């Protein structure tokens, strides 16, 4: 009887699935085939922008050529060992649709020509938030097991911490969660992690719109976490399908060893071979053996004291719901409500950007920020700079201008204001041209703003001018300063 039911159910399933197949086939032949081609093309360009550094077209300024798409496509096909056709064949589309890690395949973890690594062997980790899919104890266990994958192949060991300052902080989030990598709902990107470093360095984020499991349903948390921890320790993506560091997800047996010989070689190239702590004392300082925590202080302490009353900023901009604040080589990202702040050296968020940004602004309708340094500016979307630096003279500045003090986009007018000493320029983002009759005198148009401006940002209908450790809150409908505050209140101090 049970068997009969199974058969009946199976038969029904067959009917349903074959009708589903013929239905989609009909739709395909009936529907405009250009639509399918179009959606594949937009999938492909988004994919290449996210993982292969393809320049973003909607950044406006320079047009992207079909040649650059073709060459990026070939680069992607080379990475995945597909035929390098430079066209969107079925295998290529298939790979692009496979759920994967959010870290680019061309991500450069060695901005200084030196691969980032932890300069200590005992690394702390904390679990800041949990998924709804699994009991907390199961998450604890899977995270612990995923770290053991690496400690069993290297001299590293991992200790659980309950502090905000753990080296590797694990969190589950959906969509925008306070860094440059918003998640994308079910499928697509599963997780991402930052390479070794202060602040956000080493942290691993998991998309909680995925179904996480300890087995074969949805995505296996142990497998994905072990991959992400590879990034947290300094490894980049592998082209070898057998490697744990291969970018796309594949269901596989989790019982045995999940590292390929390449994964082992890469982790040992960074940290050396695994040592048996009980017996092998060779080449291992007695101090570090008996006081492993001492090694923690090998990491240079460059974190800014954010509640210093004299703290000032070089540049401030909103980006979606976030506020980015930059100072020297440090970046804070304030996500939504205080006190959710992510922080770290700029190049930990953006591998090719280092320090001393002069000004920054963002266009809310496009999801871009522009960062200015000297006579150059960069476009930022996601974790990557989009293309190389561009010249500010292309925006219409005269050559006497060598540096911009502050920039702010005014959402209501669609113009961006650039502040340079006691003058300001107005750039029309729709016309992509500097407005006529500028520059104008700042003090004439912004009464009360007379000192040099370090940074400016618009928020909730007010303009905020940062000058040293002071912030002037300017009401531009009333044309007057309506209050002042300390710059560090923007970091919740
Ligand atoms: C590559 O191209 C050859 C010949 O066109 C074809 O036989 C093969 O299946 C292709 N391989 C892949 C991975 O697309
Ligand atoms: C690619 O897929 C389409 C539809 O899925 C099919 O019609 C076509 O024959 C496939 N092409 C190749 C080269 O496999
Ligand atoms: C910008 O202005 C548009 C209308 O001009 C409005 O719909 C949108 O909410 C504003 N965005 C922000 C971030 O203020
Ligand atoms: C910006 O340029 C557009 C198109 O040329 C124009 O319609 C608009 O009025 C300009 N905006 C401002 C604030 O001048
Ligand atoms: C701007 O206005 C102030 C006050 O009126 C004046 O002292 C200053 O010289 C002006 N700057 C320029 C460049 O015109
Ligand atoms: Ca996702
Ligand atoms: Zn990855
Ligand atoms: Zn993230």
Image (tube, rainbow, N blue to C red):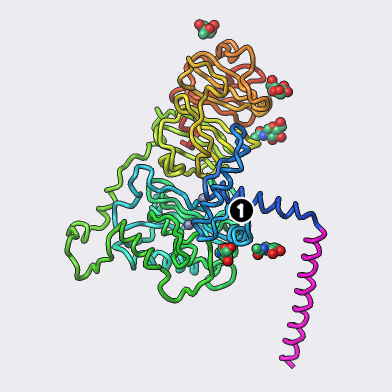
At x 54% / y 56%, what residue is drawn?
A: 84
Count of numbered circles in the view: 1
**Residue 468, percent from left and from top:** 44, 23
Residue ID for mark 1: 87
Question: In screen coordinates, is 236 left or right of 27?
Answer: left
- Is residue 69 something that shows in the picture? yes
At x 58% / y 15%, what residue is drawn?
A: 446
Along the viewing direction, whichever of 36 and 292 lies nearer the viewer: 36
Q: Secondary structure at mark 1?
A: loop
The quarter in which the N terminus is drawn is: bottom right
**Residue 315, percent from left and from top:** 48, 29
Question: In screen coordinates, is 395 left or right of 123?
Answer: right
At x 58% / y 47%, what residue is drawn?
A: 70
Highlighted range, magenta: 1-30
Q: Quadrant of ligand 3?
A: top right
Label 1 residue near ligand 2, CB within 8 Å: no
**Residue 5, percent from left and from top:** 75, 88
**Magenta stretch containing residue 21, yes or no?**
yes
Other-residue count near label 1 (Cα within 10 Å), few / some / many at <14 / 14–19 / ≥20: some
- Residue pushed farthest right? 30
**Magenta stretch containing residue 317, yes or no?**
no
**Residue 216, percent from left and from top:** 56, 73
Q: Is residue 201 above or below residue 448?
A: below
Query: Quadrant of the rendered structure where residue 90 is?
Result: bottom right
Query: Quadrant of the rendered structure where residue 131 is?
Result: bottom right
Predominant SS along the magenta part: helix
Q: Is residue 150 above or below residue 294?
A: below
Along the viewing direction, whichever of 161 and 397 lies nearer the viewer: 397
- Is residue 206 something that shows in the picture? no
Along the viewing direction, whichever of 290 and 27 lies nearer the viewer: 27
Along the viewing direction, whichever of 417 and 26 lies nearer the viewer: 26
């Amino acid at each position: 009887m049970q068997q009969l039911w199974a058969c009946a159910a199976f038969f029904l399933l067959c009917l349903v699935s074959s009708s589903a197949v013929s239905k989609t086939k009909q739709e395909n032949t009936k529907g405009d085939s250009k639509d399918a081609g179009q959606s594949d093309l937009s999938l492909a360009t988004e994919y290449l922008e996210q993982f292969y550094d393809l320049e973003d077209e909607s950044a406006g300024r320079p047009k992207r050529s079909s040649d650059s798409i073709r060459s990026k496509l070939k680069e992607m096909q080379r990475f995945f060992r597909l035929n390098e056709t430079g066209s969107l064949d079925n295998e290529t589309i298939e790979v692009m649709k496979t759920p994967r890690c959010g870290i680019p395949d061309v991500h450069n973890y060695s901005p200084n020509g030196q691969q980032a690594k932890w300069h200590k062997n005992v690394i702390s980790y904390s679990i800041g938030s949990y998924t709804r899919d699994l009991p907390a104890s199961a998450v604890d266990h899977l995270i612990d097991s995923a770290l053991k994958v690496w400690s069993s192949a290297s001299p590293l060991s991992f200790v659980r911490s309950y502090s905000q300052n753990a080296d590797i902080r694990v969190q589950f989030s959906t969509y925008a969660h306070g860094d440059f990598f918003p998640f994308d709902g079910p499928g697509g990107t599963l997780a991402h992690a930052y390479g070794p470093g202060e602040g956000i360095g080493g942290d691993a984020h998991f998309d909680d719109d995925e179904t996480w499991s300890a087995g074969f349903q949805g995505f296996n948390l142990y497998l994905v976490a072990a991959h992400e921890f590879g990034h947290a320790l300094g490894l980049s993506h592998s082209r070898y399908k057998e490697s744990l560091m291969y970018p796309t997800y594949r269901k596989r047996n989790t019982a045995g060893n999940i590292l390929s010989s390449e994964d082992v070689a890469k982790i040992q190239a960074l940290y050396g071979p695994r040592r048996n702590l009980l017996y092998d004392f060779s080449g291992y300082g007695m101090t570090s053996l008996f006081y492993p925590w001492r090694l923690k202080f090998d990491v240079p302490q460059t974190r800014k004291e954010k509640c210093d009353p004299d703290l000032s900023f070089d540049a401030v901009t909103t980006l979606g719901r976030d506020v980015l604040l930059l100072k020297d080589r440090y970046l804070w990202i304030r996500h939504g409500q205080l006190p959710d702040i992510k922080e770290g050296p700029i190049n930990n968020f953006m591998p090719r950007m280092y320090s001393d940004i002069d000004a920054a602004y963002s266009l809310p309708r496009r999801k871009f920020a522009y960062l200015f340094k000297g006579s150059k500016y960069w476009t930022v979307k996601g974790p990557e700079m989009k293309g190389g630096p561009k010249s500010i003279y292309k925006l219409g500045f005269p050559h006497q201008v060598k540096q911009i003090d502050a920039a702010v986009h005014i959402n209501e007018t669609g113009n961006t204001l650039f502040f340079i000493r006691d003058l300001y320029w107005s750039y029309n983002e729709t016309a992509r041209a500097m407005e006529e009759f500028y520059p104008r005198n700042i003090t004439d148009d912004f009464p009360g703003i007379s000192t040099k401006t370090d940074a400016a940002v618009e928020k909730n209908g007010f303009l905020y001018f940062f000058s040293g450790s002071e912030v002037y809150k300017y009401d531009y409908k009333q044309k007057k300063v309506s209050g002042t505050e300390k710059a560090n209140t923007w970091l919740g101090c």
